[in-house]
Image (tube, rainbow, N blue to C red):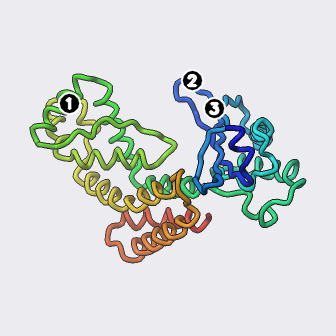
Amino acid sequence: MKAMMSKVRIIELTTDLWWSGEQKLGYMMVTGHFIDAKWVIHKRVLDFVNVPPPHTGEVLARHLIKVMDDWGIKDRVVSITVDNVSANDNCIQTLNEDIFSKWKLLLYGKLFHVRCCAHILNLLVKDGLQVIIESIEKIKGGVKHLVSSERRCNNFNRIRLAQGLSDKLQVLDNNARWNSTWFILSITCFYNTVCPRYAEEDSTFLNFLPTDIEWERVDDICRFLEVFADATELISGSYYPTVNLFLGQLWKIKCLLNDHIELSTKRHLSVMAMKMQLKFDKY
């Protein structure tokens, strides 16, 4: 792969910290993106390494420099895409001051620091979901209660099959990504006739069963968030250009937020849209 990358003139990097749930360890992944002589887009993981705390900007910059030195690409990196957190801001500033000031970056470095659009959408929706946070915790608790027991899953599936519904129960939640929460809420709404019937056999599940008002609110918000889910999936693509796609998606989201703030007759949707609008305007 080094031979292939040695022929590439321009390379873009993405980097992110990944946490191991059981080991409680932080890992840094660095990915290179480039186009070959035949105009084929490539995505290659250049490093995946445990990074002990503290995860300061200086520490992250030092690891990035090592990766670039190992691959011999330091003078060909034109931009780095990162999540929008202060440590990453400091990391990019360190790279600019200590390394890339020696080379003439594309457009004088104006495109060097790229904030991940999908991560910004993640922050928007996380703020908005606070409107129904109690319902979310209740539903997540119910899902964990079900999937932690094979017997409970079998009983739930028996009722599901009797109602002619497909199997969508096997999901795992990822607290770092809002769309996994949206997926769980959507599945729960899909089973809104199964859950009350199952609760008749499992009294503990009654503690996790949404009320009629909660069912309505969760269903409304799931429909509202479909636009965000579609946008996140589209701009998270790896093997097609996304720089020409994100602006149209952001405009669609901007119009959606404005419509719900000004026109929605459901308070939970208008409040959610206002919370998200504040974060949208910030970024």
Would you identify the image quadrant in which residue 257 lies?
bottom left
| Mark 2 or 1, nearer chain start | 2
Would you identify the image quadrant in which residue 64 lies?
top right
Residue of label 2: 23
What's the residue type where badge 1 is placed?
Ser
| Mark 1 or 3, nearer chain start | 3
Against 250, residue 218 (above or below) is: above
- Is label 2 in a helix, a strand or a loop? loop
Marks 1/3 in contact by CB < 8 Å: the verdict is: no
Could you give the CA–CA distance between mark 1 and mark 3, rounded to whole angstroms? Answer: 39 Å
- Badge nearest the viewer, 1 or 3: 3
Residue of label 3: 26
What's the residue type where badge 2 is placed?
Gln
Residue of label 1: 203
Would you identify the image quadrant in which residue 143 lies?
top left
Please state if 177 lies on the left or on the right of 186 as rendered.
Answer: right
What's the residue type where badge 3 is placed?
Gly
